[in-house]
Amino acid sequence: MALPLSADRIGPLTQDAVRIVGACKSYGSLKVLKDVDLAVHPGEVVCVIGPSGAGKSTLLRCVNRLERLDAGLVLIDGDPIGLVARGNHLRELPEARVAAQRARVGMVFQRFNLFPHMTVRDNITQAPVLVNKETKTAAIAEARRLLAQVGLAEKELAYPNELSGGQQQRVAIARALAMRPKIMLFDEPTSALDPELVGEVLAVMKGLSDTGMTMIVVTHEIGFAREVADTVVFMADGQIIEAGPPEAVLDEPRHERTRDFLARVL
Ligand code: ADP
Ligand code: MG
């Protein structure tokens, strides 16, 4: 595959934690991502809002290459994910190398996908031991630190079905963090929760942003976006309609589609 984009379109690579350039993705004849560009700086929190079907989840899945783009690039810390440059050409990376790249990107989904037959501690330590080759002792120490960070120090030996949905989602965050990701992606992490459990998960995410973690958060929690996001991105119909600081996009949206969407969710 020839390099699809000129260097001037990509720009200086090193300053961005995530750079999405010209992302296109279709499912059959349905164009789900239509030439999406997005840059996320180190330590930045980007909240992505928009109607169902806009392509938000697809965009996140392309960032850690759970899905492949049809065209365009995703760069993580300047490295094209899934691809390696050879002269003027890009080659596909072997799956083992893609897995190593993916480990730099943590992801938390709508439904907590903890392993039901494992304790909280084993859920958190499994990948660091198996994939990152950490010692069990070091992984357990890190799991304890992370459980304290998400407010669940006393649940180390509990099983997922003994926890509330909010607690399970906080464990899922700790489990993702245990891989020491540089970037965290969240896909509607609170939308499957009972309303009274949403706040505790958002509080953990806010705490994580305070540590300087780079985060892309797809959410319908406009209050969270307003409070925590550096940048709010409004997506509709496979495109970024507008992006900017929360007070601009949420309070003075420039586009009618953004206004319509906000009028329905606020
Ligand atoms: P959002 O997260 O904004 O609701 P998605 O990225 O999940 O949007 O989906 C965008 C569009 O792509 C939707 O119309 C959805 O039905 C479609 N879609 C998503 N994943 C697939 C898939 N694996 N196969 C076919 N269509 C899909
Ligand atoms: Mg979605």
Image: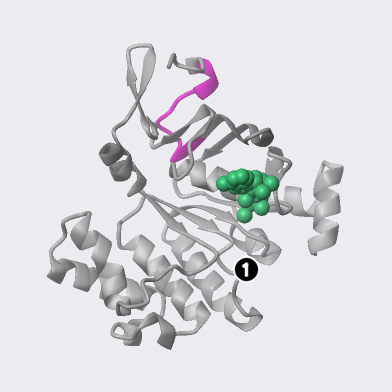
> Which residue in the structure is indicated by mark 1?
191
Image coordinates for residue 56, horizontal then vertical, percent: 62, 48
- Any part of residue 233 in sight: no
Q: Residue at x 67, y 44 (%)?
A: 244
Is the CB of the residue bearing disc 1 within 8 angstroms of ligand 2?
no
Image coordinates for residue 209, horizontal then vertical, percent: 48, 60
Q: Residue at x 35, y 66 (%)?
A: 175
Provide the secondary structure element on which disc 1 rests.
loop
In the rendered image, the residue lying farthest to the top is 88
Q: Is residue 258 above or below residue 265?
A: above
Along the line of sight, which residue is nearer the eye, 14 or 79? 79
Image coordinates for residue 264, horizontal then vertical, percent: 84, 60
Q: Which residues are magenta?
A: 8-19
The N terminus lies in quadrant: top left
Number of marks in the rendered image: 1
- Any part of residue 162 in sight: yes
Q: Quadrant of residue 139?
A: bottom left
Along the line of sight, which residue is nearer the eye, 199 or 189? 189
Q: Is residue 249 above or below residue 160?
A: above
Along the line of sight, which residue is nearer the eye, 88 or 250? 88
Viewed as shown, does residue 68 lie left or right of 117? right
Magenta-drawn stretch contains 15? yes
Q: Residue at x 55, y 70 (%)?
A: 202
Q: Residue at x 42, y 66 (%)?
A: 173
Magenta-drawn stretch contains 89? no
Q: Is residue 171 above or below residue 157?
A: above
Ligand 2 quarter of the rendering: bottom right
Q: Amino acid at mark 1?
A: Ser
Viewed as shown, does residue 149 lie left or right of 67? left
Image coordinates for residue 55, horizontal then vertical, percent: 64, 45
Q: Is residue 26 above or below residue 164?
A: above
